[in-house]
Amino acid sequence: MSKEKSFAEINKKIEKGEVLVLTAEEMSDFVDEYGEDTALEEVDVVTTATFGAMCSSGAFLNFGHSDPPIRMGRVYLNDVLAYSGLAAVDAYIGATEESESLGAQYGGAHVIEDLISGKEVHLSASSKGTDCYPRKEIDTYITLEDLNQAYLFNPRNCYQNYWVAVNSSEKIIYTYMGPLYGNYENASYSSAGQLSPLLNDPYYRTIGIGSRIFLGGAQGYIAWEGTQHNPLRKRGENGIPVGGAGTLAVIGDLKEMSKEYIRAASVTNYGVSMYVGIGIPIPILNKEMVRYTAVRDKDLYVTVVDYSAGLRDNPTLGMVSYQELRSGKIVLENGREVSTAPLSSLNKARKIAAELKDWIKRGEFFLEEPVQNLSQNRKFNPLEIRKEADAYV
Amino acid sequence: MYSRRVKLVYQPNIVGEPIIYNLIKKFDIEINIIQAKISPVEEGKLVMDMKAEEINYLEKGINYLLKEGIVVKTLDKSIVYREEDCVFCGACTGLCKTGALKMDQENWELIVDHTSCLLCGMCINACAFNALSLGVNGRDK
């Protein structure tokens, strides 16, 4: 019988400076060299990370009150619309909202990046005016420091696996997976593979609501399951999903984040997105977690999807491993050899995993046991187009 | 050294002419061929770098090409890579067909090899961070 560990025991080791932390890549080598029993005995925490495009991101901001005060109706930050159907001076700036004047060159993600960089941002808002909030227009400048609260609250980040995108049509198409030449000339993929958080904890045993994480260079939290969380996605024999599956909603203080790990992106002929850096520590509680965190790119499979059809369920062309994708060439089910390129940054993901490891080793970051697990059976519903139901008849 | 990247277009009737030999021998120009499509029956296309100690060697060499009836287009631009804006995602490498942009398989940083770039500009479309653009470089002296 191998011994099990608890979150509390691991945190005690962090406090005493006796914790052994490895990145997910180091863990694979460690298990290969010393075996699972020794790994369980010695390794306390494995750090995982990813740095990629996460469109479903944005930030809640509170501007404070002007004198006389205004109940902000339409709010613009550097000419990008922020949602303000909230209390008087609260707003949510969504990452993908585009500038009224510059279009996809500048958007919500750029506003967030500018705020993090300490730049001044132009704020303009209009209002109908009320007795208690008489002001009808405001035009001013703000910085991150001026804001009372500014927190990133991203409804869907950190996808558990994703897809490989190719294009079978004759001509180039521009997608959120980047430009794809026709006739399967290139393939793009977007995952940190063996370093990716939810690929190292495929059944969400330790990653759940309340988990403390690395978010954009700050300490943040998992707030909820992410939108489109789809734990029932088809899984391989090793239990790992072969396409986009689980997702996370995450929250963290924008004031503590760094431009190094939050970057605005303008995807050609698609629009604005935001690259988010996330790191998640996985406690090595038992043998099961040893096995999960020892996973390698060669064991992680992902489905190839033809993006040219523009359908909800695009045609698929078999599965490939992340090891094959990283080699620069894959062979599709139809025999076509295709060159590959990543969209998420392994270089940055490694930096995040290493930084999180340092935080834990230095006793600056403690693990938080989930207060509730993520759903294992949430159904992923499509949107059907239909007439109004006869519910009231 | 003075250098210039040029694209030559010529008709099949001069394919037999030893133009590269002449550029090297008579005009003392160093030639590095980047892309060549030559056939005895079709229009020929050649992209190459020309290097010389003196700027007038290059000018004389180009005048010789023009006299031979070759269309010479100077490619005086190059891809400018701003590493400080790059996140090392690798998106650009998928669009680059000549291998001018590659990911280092060890540390997953971008490797830029200007000598094999054909200035197609697709990497500029692929970069979401404006880390790549087209700039004028001209001479490297």
Image (spheres, rainbow, N blue to C red):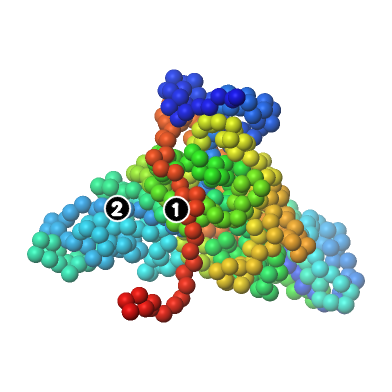
Q: Which mark is residue A226?
A: 1
State the residue position of label 2. A61
Q: Name which quarter of the figure residue B67 lies in.
A: bottom right
Residue B46 vertical placement versus A13 (above, below)? below
Residue at the spot x=84%, y=77% of the render?
Answer: B42
The kind of residue tagged 1 is Gly
Please state if A126 lies on the left or on the right of A41 as rendered.
Answer: left
Of callouts 1 and 2, which one flags the residue occurring earlier in the amino acid sequence? 2
Q: Nearer the viewer, residue A96 or B137?
A: A96
Q: Name which quarter of the figure residue A11 lies in.
A: top left
The answer to whether any part of residue A366 appears in the image is yes
Q: Nearer the viewer, residue B14 or B2?
A: B14
Where is residue B5 shown, x and y percent of the image?
70, 61
In the picture, which quadrant includes the C terminus of chain A?
bottom left
Residue A316 vertical placement versus A255 (above, below)? below
Where is residue A392 shown, x and y percent of the image?
32, 76
Q: Chain of mark 2?
A: A
In the picture, which quadrant includes the N terminus of chain A?
top right
Residue at the spot x=79%, y=59% of the render?
Answer: B33
Q: Nearer the viewer, residue A208 or A153?
A: A208
Where is residue B85 shown, x and y percent of the image?
51, 51
